[in-house]
Image (cartoon, rainbow, N blue to C red):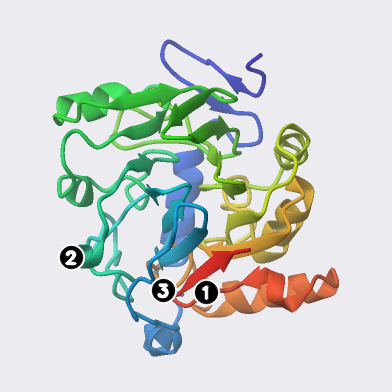
Amino acid sequence: MRPDRRRTWPRSFRNRLASPLPELREALSAVWHGGLRPHVGDADQIPVRRSGLTPVTAFQAMVTWVGHATYLLRIGGLTVLTDPVWSARIPGVRRRRLTPPGVAWSDLPPVDAVLISHNHYDHLDIRTLRRLPRNTPFFVPAGLRRWFARRGFRRVAELDWWERATLGGLSFDFVPAHHWSRRGVFDTCRTLWGGWMISGGGHRIYFAGDTAYGERFLEIGERYPGIDLALMPVGAYESRGFVDETHVDPAQAVQGCLDVGARRMATMHWGTFVLSGEPLLAPVELARRGWAEHARPRADLWDLAIGESRLLR
């Protein structure tokens, strides 16, 4: 069953919530906020804690926020990266990194698997990927395998929504998101987008990738009960009306976490690149407010500093 992710022309996908030209909407947002960028001097207030990685056992699960949508997951005895970006800048106007990666590349343990949510430059960074061995296992959305194969990567599993792949006792399920894809001029929505459910070692972690708010969160929660932690994007939401069909705001991120039934939420997609016009610290401040309004335990909101780790218990 593949509703909502519908083909509109050969080798193309469509987000049911988004306009036919999502790239135009985000381009308009970038132009609109060109003179209204947040004061980047606030970047020194973004918390960074690069204290090194604590060893974990095969029976433990630990998450470390590297920055933006990049998390280092150590779960089920394996090391997994989500949307790895270590580059100092990404393509686009003023897309220079505000804060350093939370883990130095030289401090990374051997990477057992990489999860890619979609092909936007702030999630699929070729300069970072080229630093990995070409036999690293990648799990990618439908339509992206060829892109990896052309760059010499040999172990690439391409998944459609609700499909599953396994590796070393972990399962990786590709789940829907309300978003879009584009990397060049003529490839809008030619590859799929989504989130990942990582299960194994007695733990379950949901990585939402990039997404707007929609009914898919409830469906994901129904299919995957017992989520220990949801990694939710909270930034790049201003101005509403331009990008509200492709990104959640902090309150919607909290609601999405509740919808999937996750016990805890960890924030991401803020404090690394300037992608829209909200103040730099607003995403995490508003996420804290939304969490409190739902009377959720403060300890279950993991508003991590860049480089900070937490152990799932």
The amino acid marked with disc number 3 is Gly
**Residue lying furthest top:** 10
Tag 1, which secondary structure? loop
Query: Residue 100 placed where, x, y %?
Result: 29, 74
Mark earlier in primary sequence (2, 1): 2
Q: Distance between the residues labelled 2 and 3?
A: 37 Å
Give above or below for 208 relative to 296. above
Q: Name the residue under label 2.
A: 106
Give above or below for 169 relative to 50. above
In the image, taking residue 17 as reference, residue 137 lies left or right, namely left
Within the image, what quadrant is residue 218 found in? top right
Query: Residue 17 placed where, x, y %?
Result: 66, 35
Question: Mark 1 touching mark 3, by CB under 8 A?
Answer: no
In the image, taking residue 1 as reference, residue 132 lies left or right, namely left
Residue 3 visible in the displayed image: yes
Query: Residue 97 placed where, x, y %?
Result: 29, 70
Which label sits on residue 155? Answer: none
Q: Distance between the residues labelled 2 and 1?
A: 22 Å
Mark earlier in primary sequence (2, 3): 3
Q: Residue at x 53, y 40 (%)?
A: 196
Badge 1: residue crowd in 10 Å (few <14, some 14–19, many ≥20): many
Badge 3: residue crowd in 10 Å (few <14, some 14–19, many ≥20): few
Q: Mark 1 points at which residue?
A: 304
Q: In which quarter of the image is the C terminus?
A: bottom right
Q: Distance between the residues labelled 1 and 3?
A: 30 Å
The amino acid marked with disc number 2 is Ser
Q: Name the residue under label 3.
A: 35
